Image (cartoon, helix red, strand yellow):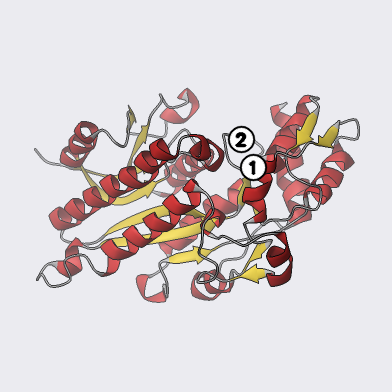
């Protein structure tokens, strides 16, 4: 059977998945194949050649996709997010690690068949970092990719290990074989900050207090933020996250000096987020009711990250700073939705 060329996207129903499907459909003629544990939102099915409802742990499904398609790229977005992962660490490990290993194994097989590397995008997270506490967080400021890699959550452990798995498959797997150059995975990862979407509702991330605050205000629902007012961490709009993925994947291999990059846009405190939301929704009822477990997670993450490598290697610069994020994207988009 002749395999059909295409691009595989897992986790198509997630916050990043919806935006990435739309963006890729506009810029490529290759068939897009989607995989998610639930049926894809009908509004996005028109962009895909095939949408598969299934588990990334199901080898039967993966073997079928592997036999039917020749993938030039795999965007592996499927994951169990941070807050949910703390309640089910064993399940999180299965989905986040074993699922990623399944997809990396597929990429190697695809590269061997195609005779050239397969690009593999992996969305990592600020959760890979682990600080001793608030005092250290306030002292160190923005940190680089190599610093403080001591994750305090199962999600962070999963993400850091998957970065290492991707690096192994890209740089070391089958190094001694004649076909090593063609069977390798062209692994590329971004460590995302908190992401804010005007369209998609939050779905279990520990940084979701920012989009939850905004969406609740737009709906007219009261909201108690689960972190302290002084809590600070980096954020980015969803369109900038999609732009970052596409720019990294389009970058020439020779310009890539590392396989995992920090990426950032702005880093407001929770109090500043509340103030900015109230500027557009003055009747919103936004309070603070700290969830100590989730607060501890955010306190273990840096208040900012150093994105110099992404800027120097593939000219990353966000379209939205803090004010532009609200004025140009979040407030217009969310008013239209609600």
Question: Which residue is under mark 1?
Answer: 293
Residue 10 visible in the current orientation: no
Residue placed most toward the observer, 31 or 314: 314
Q: Give the structural element (helix, strand or loop) at label 2.
A: loop
Residue depicted at x 51% and y 43%:
16
- Quadrant including the C terminus: top right
Residue placed most toward the observer, 74 or 260: 260
Residue 30 percent across, percent down from the top left: 32, 45
Q: Is residue 6 above or below residue 300?
A: above
Residue depicted at x 81% and y 27%:
222
Q: Quadrant of residue 162?
A: bottom left
Q: In the displayed structure, does residue 124 sit left or right of residue 7?
A: right
The residue carrying pointer 2 sits among few (fewer than 14), some (14 to 19) or many (20 or more) residues within 10 Å by Cα, namely: some
How many numbered marks are there?
A: 2
Q: Nearer the viewer, mark 1 or mark 2?
A: 1
Residue lying at the far right of the rendered structure: 282
Give the numbered dot on residue 67.
none
Q: In the displayed structure, does residue 16 sit left or right of residue 324?
A: left
Residue 324 percent across, percent down from the top left: 75, 53
Residue depicted at x 50% and y 64%:
149
Q: In the displayed structure, does residue 132 sit left or right of residue 42?
A: right
Q: Is residue 203 above or below residue 6?
A: above
Residue 42 percent across, percent down from the top left: 46, 23
Q: Quadrant of residue 293?
A: top right
Q: Give the structural element (helix, strand or loop) at label 1.
A: helix
What is the CA distance from the residue labelled 1 to the residue labelled 2? 18 Å
- Quadrant including the N terminus: top left
Question: Which residue is under mark 2?
Answer: 202
Residue placed most toward the observer, 247 or 153: 153
The residue carrying pointer 1 sits among few (fewer than 14), some (14 to 19) or many (20 or more) residues within 10 Å by Cα, namely: few
């Amino acid at each position: 059977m002749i395999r059909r060329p295409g691009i595989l996207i897992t986790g198509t129903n997630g916050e990043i998945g919806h935006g990435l499907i739309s963006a890729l459909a506009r810029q490529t003629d290759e068939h897009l194949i989607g995989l998610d544990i639930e049926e894809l939102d009908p509004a996005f099915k028109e962009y895909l050649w095939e949408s598969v409802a299934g588990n990334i742990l199901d080898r039967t499904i993966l073997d079928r996709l592997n036999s039917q398609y020749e993938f030039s790229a795999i965007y592996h977005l499927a994951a169990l997010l941070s807050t949910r992962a703390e309640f089910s660490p064993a399940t999180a490990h299965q989905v986040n690690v074993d699922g990623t290993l399944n997809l990396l194994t597929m990429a190697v097989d695809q590269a061997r068949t195609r005779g050239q590397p397969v690009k593999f995008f992996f969305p990592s997270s600020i959760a890979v970092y682990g600080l001793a506490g608030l005092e250290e967080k306030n002292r160190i400021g923005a940190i680089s990719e190599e610093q403080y890699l001591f994750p305090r959550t199962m999600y962070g452990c999963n993400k850091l290990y998957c970065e290492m798995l991707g690096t192994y498959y890209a740089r070391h797997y089958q190094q001694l074989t004649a076909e090593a150059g063609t069977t390798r995975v062209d692994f590329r990862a971004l460590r995302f900050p908190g992401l804010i979407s005007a369209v998609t509702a939050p779905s279990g991330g520990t940084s979701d207090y920012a989009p939850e605050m905004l969406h609740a205000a737009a709906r007219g629902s009261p909201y108690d933020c689960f972190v302290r007012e002084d809590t600070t961490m980096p954020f980015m709009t969803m369109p900038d996250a999609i732009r970052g993925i596409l720019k990294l994947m389009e970058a020439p291999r020779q310009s890539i000096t590392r396989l995992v990059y920090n990426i950032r846009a702005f880093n407001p405190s929770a109090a500043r987020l509340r103030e900015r939301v109230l500027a557009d929704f003055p009747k919103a009822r936004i309070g603070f009711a700290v969830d100590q477990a989730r607060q501890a997670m955010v306190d273990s993450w840096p208040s900012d990250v150093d994105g110099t490598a992404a800027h120097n290697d593939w000219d990353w610069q966000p379209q939205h700073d803090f004010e532009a994020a609200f004025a140009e994207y979040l407030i217009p988009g969310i008013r239209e939705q609600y």
